[in-house]
Image (cartoon, helix red, strand yellow):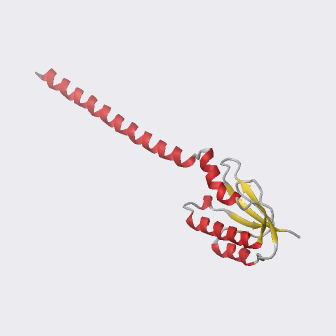
Amino acid sequence: MENASKALIIAGAILLSIAIIGIGMFVYNSVSETISSSADMTEQEVNAYNSEFSNYEGIRNGSQVKQLCTLVRHHNTQAADPSEEISLIQGTASDISAPTTTGTAGTTSTEINTIRSGVLSGRQYTVSLGLDPSTGRVTQVGIQINE
């Protein structure tokens, strides 16, 4: 009788251990799926993300560049993470993840508004995009006046 009660206690401990391990694996799989799905964007998602900015790439008039400035400002205010913000610069954008520029750069609404106010509607501008090499997403928009 004493052996039977010990056997039942051991069997209960084993079942409890299996249940705890199972719950741990379920939680781990749920968290790893969430992390991998948010960090990795498919090529189609990257193209869709970049398309709203790539429509402005090339030679544009001042009013189109002002619309682009407004778009970048709106994008930056909606960004959940500061690393998702797009830097607006006066000059040529470059394909680097942490842009360093010699011109005026802006990510805040005030900085973008300052750059936007300097854009003249009657002038022509060259708009360039800087992409993050690891993700392929736009991280920088360059605006350069055509002389």
Residue depicted at 63% across the width and 69% down the height: 73
144 displayed left or right of 134: right
9 displayed left or right of 62: left
Question: Quarter of the image holding residue 111?
Answer: bottom right
User: Does residue 43 sit above or below 91 in this rendering?
Assistant: above
Residue 17 percent across, percent down from the top left:
31, 33
Q: Residue furthest left?
A: 1
Question: Quarter of the image holding residue 61?
Answer: bottom right
Residue 125 percent across, percent down from the top left:
80, 68
Residue depicted at 61% across the width and 46% down the height: 44
User: Does residue 48 sit above or below 5 in this rendering?
Assistant: below
Nearest the viewer among 29 and 145 is: 145
2 displayed left or right of 22: left
Residue depicted at 77% across the width and 56% down the height: 94
Residue 79 percent across, percent down from the top left:
57, 62
Q: Which residue lies furthest to the right in this view?
A: 147
Residue 81 percent across, percent down from the top left:
57, 60
Image quarter in which the N terminus is found:
top left
Nearest the viewer among 42 and 124 is: 124
Nearest the viewer among 144 and 103 is: 144
User: Does residue 109 sit above or below 126 in this rendering?
Assistant: below
Image quarter in which the C terminus is found:
bottom right
Q: How many labels does the image show?
A: 0
Nearest the viewer among 71 and 1 is: 71
